[in-house]
Image: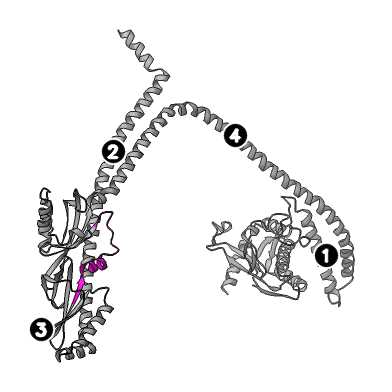
Amino acid sequence: MNGRKKEGQRAWNTPENQDFREIVRWIVLLIVLMEVAGGLITNSIKSYQVALLDSQKGQLINVSNSVAGSIELYLEDCQNMARGITKSRAFQLAERQQEEGSPAAMQQLLEENLAVYQEDIVCLSYRGRDGKSLSAGDDRGYVVHRDLGSSEALEDIAIMKAADGTFYFRESASSEDGGVLYLYLPMTTVYTQTTSGIQMGANGYVMIKDSGGVILMHPVKEQIGLNVISGRQEEYPDLDLSELKTLVQHQLAGRSGVEVYHSYWWANDPPTRTRKVSAYVPVRIGRDFLCVSAVMDYSEILEPAARIAIRILIAALTTTIFLIVLIRNLIKGIQSQRQTRRENEKLLRINEEQEKLRKQSEINAQQQRLQLIGTMTSGIAHEFNNLLTPIMGYSGLMLSGMTPEDENYDDVKEIYSAAEKAKEIINQISQFSRKNAQQMMEPVHVAEVTDRALVITEAAKPKNITLERSISPDRDLCQGNEIQIYQIIINLCNNAMQAMKEDGGTLTVTAAAVQAGERHDEYFRGRPEQWFYRISVRDTGCGMTQEEIDQIFIPFYTTKRPGEGTGLGLAIVQRLVDAHSGHICVHSQIGKGSEFVVYFPVLPQTENAGEESAEA
C-alpha cells in the first residue's frame, strides 16, 4: 500500500504534472478573483443606479419648476397685454361711444386686437358698466370651470371649459370707466409655449391639473378633462391605482416633491402597468393653484446602468476566455523563455560588436581626415615658409642697421612682427591634426593682445561694417601663447565680418575680467570664486539655427558658400581655446546675429588685481 502511494507521488511530481499543477493553481486564483470582482462590480452598479436616480430626480424637479415659472410669466404677459389695451386712447374713446349707444368702434377695436394677438388669444370680449357685452372671435359656449380669483399680478382669472371639452384661461382687465376686457387663452397654446423643447426620455411628459385633480394639459388629448383618480377609476375599474392615489393626495395638498410609484401608460389600449418617477410643484395663480408634474419612465432612468452591467458581463466573459487561453499558453511560454533569453543575449552581443565596429570606423575616418590635413598643411607650410624667409630676413637685417629713432624703424618692425605671427600661424595649421601639439605657454596680458588684434581688424574690415570695442584695461595675466590668442581673436572677427559682408552691420568686441559666479555652464561648475578673462565677439549678421550651432566646430563644416571658406577656422579656434584650458560658447538668433564668447582662466596671483579692476 505504501509502495503504491510513493509511486503515485513520484508520478504526480513529474515535469508534466508540475505544469498541470501550475495551471490548476492559476485557475483557482482566477475563480477567486472573479468572485471578488463580481461582488465589487455589483455594489458599484447599485451605487451608480442610486446616484443616477438621484440625479434624474433633481433634473425632473428642475423641469417642473421651469414649467411652473413659464406659466406664471406667460399669464402675467397676457395680463399686461390686456391692461395695455384698456389704457390705450383708442379703447377709451370706443368705451365712451359704447356707453353713448354706439358699439361699432368697440367692436372694431376688439377685432383689430384679436387679429394682432391671434396666436395667443381665441376670443376677446368686453362688458360695459351697463352690463352690455361685445365679443370678437370664436364663441365656444364657455362656462366657468374653476374661478382662481385674483392676485397682485393678476386680476380676476378663471378656468373656462368650452362645449367641446377644451379648457381656456380667461384673464380680465378693468378700465377706468368700469368696463371689463376679457381674454380667452387656449390651454393647448399655453402648454405648447411653456413645455416646448423639453425631452425626458422616450416616454416622459409634463402634465398640469387643477387643485381638484382634473387634468387640464396633457400630451394625450383623451386624458384632458379627466379627474386623475375618479375619472380613471370609472374607465378602468379593475386597475390598481393605490400608489397613484397617494401621489395625487400629496400633489393636491399643494406640496412639492419627487416620488416613485406604480401607474399605467394611459395611451396604450389597454393601459400597461409600469413604474414611473414624478416630480411635482404647485404654481400659484390668484387664490388657487395648479399642479405641474414631470413624469418619466423609471426603467429609462436605470437603462444606462443596465447597459453598463451588460457590457461589464460581456467584458468579464471575454476576459475569462482570454485568461483561460493565456494560462494554457503560459506553460509553453515558460518553456521557451530560457531559449528566447539566450537568443536575445546572443543578438545583444552581436549588436554591441556591430556598434563597436561602427564607432571604430568613424574614428578611423576622422583619423584619415586629420592625416589628410597634416599632409596638406605640411606642403602649404613649406611654401609659406619659403615666402616668409626673405621677408623676415631682409626686415631683420634692416632692423639691425636701424635705431628706434629712425623714421622707418616702426614700419620695418611691424613688417617683421607680422611675418613672425604669420609664421606662427603656419605652424599652428601644420600642427592642427596632432592631438597633443605642444606650444610654449607663458603669462600673457590678454587685453593687450586683444587691442593689437583689433588694430589689424580695423584696417581689414569693409567700409559697410562698423567696429565697436570696449576693452577693459585689466592687468590680469592668463597662462597662454600670445600668438595663439591673437589667432583666436582674428579668426572670430573674420568670421563675424564674413557674416555681415553683404548687408554690413556692427562688429562689437568687449573684453573684461569676470568672476564665474552662478553661471550654469558645466565648465564653471565647482569654481564660482574663480576669475576669467572674457572676450565677446558679436555681429549683427544673418544668425544661425540650432542645428548649425551644433556643427560649427566640426572640421570642414561651413555655413559659407562654396569657395568662401574651408570649414577649419572655428575648429582651430576651439582647439586653441582647449589648449589654454579655456571655454567657448555661442549664442545666435536668425535675423539678429551671433555672439562668440571665450573665457581664459586668470592666473591666481592676478585675481586680486582683476577684482579691484572690476570694482573700479
- Name the residue beneath numbered marker 3: 131
The amino acid on which the numbered mark 4 sits, given as a three-letter code, is Arg
Query: What's the distance in space between the residues labelled 1 and 3, CA to CA?
Result: 132 Å
Query: What's the distance in space between the residues labelled 3 and 4, CA to CA?
Result: 114 Å
* Tag count: 4
Q: What residue is rendered at 72% in x and 50% in y?
A: 436
Task: Classify residue 190 as left or right of residue 12.
Answer: left
Residues 19 and 347: in front is 19
Q: SS at mark 2?
A: helix
Sequence-earlier tag: 4 or 2: 2
- Name the residue beneath numbered marker 4: 349
Q: Is residue 476 visible?
A: no
Sequence-earlier tag: 1 or 3: 3
Question: Relative to residue 108, is residue 169 depicted above or below?
Answer: above
- Residue 319 is covered by the magenta coloring: no
Sequence-earlier tag: 2 or 1: 2
The amino acid on which the numbered mark 2 sits, given as a three-letter code, is Gly
Task: Give the position of the C terminus as an image quadrant.
Answer: bottom right
Mark 3 surroundings: few (<14), some (14-19) or many (≥20) residues within 10 A: few
Mark 1 surroundings: few (<14), some (14-19) or many (≥20) residues within 10 A: many
Single out the mark in the foreground, 3 or 4: 3
Start-end of magenta stretch:
183-204
Question: Relative to residue 96, is residue 437 depicted above or below?
Answer: above
- The percent coordinates of residue 147 (x first, y second) are 10, 72
Would you say the residues marked 4 and 1 are in contact, meaning their CB atoms lie under 8 Å apart? no
- Name the residue beneath numbered marker 1: 419
Single out the mark in the foreground, 1 or 3: 3
